[in-house]
């Protein structure tokens, strides 16, 4: 296996650790901070696999997380970021499989700007599935494992949040 692929696998596993910690958190703020760290590792992973659309959109994911924390609910900011995602995808497009990172970026953008709690995690789960499909295409074992663990951890956290909501009606965890 070439060194670039080995490094890609390693960065996928690093991202895995950050993702598990983030999605296990009941705090949206902590989730966002840990996702920034995970996405730095994912961007490096995609670059080592020469998956340029995924790498570029992942850099935008980092920007999106920072902006969504500051401008939660801001439709204008969300729309601008969605347009930038489309422009970057168009500029880096290599094949039809680049639809996977684009779908993930769009879902993540809408979720992070407009949703909280359980709804946020459901949409981010769909985004993780799209990223997983991309990782299958490029052959990133670390990336596949990271997204699979994100999905499992996300489902567990959604169940925990749902139990809290049922136990304490009126409180949005």
Image (cartoon, rainbow, N blue to C red):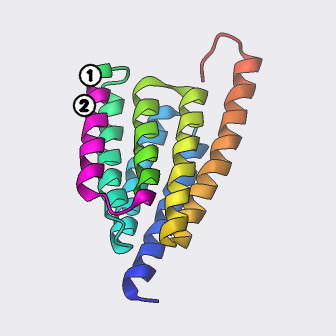
In the image, the segment drawn in magenta is 76-97
Q: Kindly identify which numbered label has been placed on residue 138.
A: none
- Residue located farthest toward the front when viewing the structure as drawn: 96
Indicate whether 43 appears above or below 76.
Answer: below
In the image: residue 77, left or right of residue 98: left
Quarter of the picture holding the C terminus: top right
Q: Position of residue 166 (x, y in %)?
A: 75, 19
Name the residue: 63% across, 43% down: 154
Indicate whether 71 appears above or below 42.
Answer: above
State the separation of the CA atoms marked 1 and 2.
Answer: 6 Å
Query: Quadrant of residue 52 in the image?
Result: bottom left
Mark 1 neighbour class, 10 Å CA radius: few under 14, some 14 to 19, many 20 or more: few
Residue that numbered label 2 is attached to: 80
Indicate whether 94 appears above or below 131.
Answer: below
- Residue located farthest toward the top when viewing the structure as drawn: 170
Whether residue 21 is visible to the viewer of this picture, yes or no, is: no
Which element is circle 1 on?
helix
Name the residue: 48% across, 74% down: 9
In the image: residue 112, left or right of residue 47: right
Residue that numbered label 1 is attached to: 76
Q: Nearer the viewer, residue 153 or 49?
A: 49
Marks 1 and 2 in Cβ contact (< 8 Å): yes
Q: Position of residue 33 (x, y in %)?
A: 40, 43
Q: Is residue 123 magenta?
A: no
Name the residue: 37% across, 58% down: 54
Magenta region, main secondary structure: helix
Whether residue 90 is visible to the viewer of this picture, yes or no, is: yes
Which element is circle 2 on?
helix
Q: Position of residue 63 (x, y in %)?
A: 28, 43
Q: Position of residue 141 (x, y in %)?
A: 56, 72
């Amino acid at each position: 296996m070439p060194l670039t692929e080995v490094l890609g696998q390693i960065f996928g596993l690093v991202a895995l650790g950050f993702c598990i910690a983030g999605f296990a958190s009941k705090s949206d703020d902590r989730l966002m901070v840990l996702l920034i760290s995970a996405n730095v590792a994912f961007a490096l992973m995609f670059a080592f696999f020469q998956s340029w659309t995924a790498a570029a959109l992942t850099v935008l994911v980092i920007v999106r997380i920072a902006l969504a924390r500051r401008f939660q609910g801001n439709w204008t900011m969300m729309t601008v970021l969605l347009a930038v995602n489309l422009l970057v995808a168009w500029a880096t497009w290599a094949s039809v499989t680049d639809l996977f990172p684009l779908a993930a970026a769009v879902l993540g953008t809408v979720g992070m700007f407009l949703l909280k709690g359980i709804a946020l995690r459901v949409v981010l789960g769909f985004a993780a599935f799209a990223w997983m499909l991309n990782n299958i295409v490029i052959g990133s074992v670390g990336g596949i494992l990271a997204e699979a663990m994100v999905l499992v951890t996300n489902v567990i956290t959604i169940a925990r949040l749902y139990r809290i909501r049922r136990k304490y009606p009126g409180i949005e965890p």
